Image (cartoon, grey):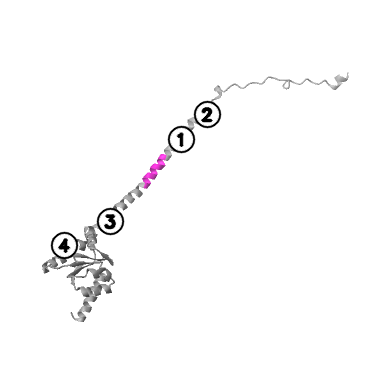
Amino acid sequence: MAREDKVSAVAELTERFQTSDGAVLTEYRGLTVSQLAELRAALGGGTTYQVVKNTLTKRAATEAGLASELDVLLSGPSAIAFVKGDVVEAAKGLRDFSRNNPLLVIKGGVLDGKAISPADIEQLADLEPREVLLAKLAGDMKASMAKAAAVFNALPVQMAQLAEALRAKLEAEGGAAAPAADAAAPDGPEDSAPAETPDATADDAPAAEAPDAETASE
């Protein structure tokens, strides 16, 4: 390759590393052109599967700050799946294709700037697609909101029931207190004991009249 072509290729790879959500390195030795086309179709529109030169890719990885994660993987015929969007879908496509075509070897890659192993990619492939997870999350949130709305709607009814129960309780307590008060009150006049008439005493007797002064002098 001419120098200008190499510089352009390194710049392109560097940009792909920097703008992709993930990158998976593979060895494609022995795969035919038609098989590579089948693989690209299986990865979906958000993933670019590109055959690369190891020396240029190492330069691009260095410029993108990923040299330590990728240098050891760049050996033999290499191709990289640059993923934009759903990394799970790309991992699932690579995993399924490699099962049917053992010549495709998944070597590892990077995800959010961190190295991932072939085992990590297998675990990603076992996850449900992003759209399914989002749909489930939306369903759970909708169910939670519906439950909360039902609770709020039930509060006025429950408050009314509580107020009615309290009113009935107070009435019952008031009704029980009234008979108790009647039992404690004294009976009418016919049941009351007759009042005692005090005996006449000397103090109550009429006083003797004093003699007139004239009579006394006689």
- Name the chief secondary structure element in magenta: helix
Residue at the (29%, 52%) spot, across then down: 143
Query: Disc 4 versus disc 3: distance between alpha carbons?
Result: 31 Å
- Which residue carries the number 3 mark? 137
77 to the left or right of 149 = left
Where is residue 187? Give x, y as percent. Answer: 54, 25
The amino acid beneath tag 1 is Glu
Where is residue 25? Give x, y as percent. Answer: 21, 67
- Which residue carries the number 2 mark? 184
In this rendered view, identify the residue nearer to me: 203 or 43: 43
> Closer to us: mark 1 or mark 4?
4
- Which residue carries the number 1 mark? 173
The amino acid beneath tag 3 is Leu
Is residue 66 in view from this perspective? no
Which segment is the magenta one? 155-165
Identify whether 126 is placed above or below 115.
Answer: above
Specify the label residue 98 is tagged with: 4
Query: Disc 1 versus disc 4: distance between alpha carbons?
Result: 81 Å
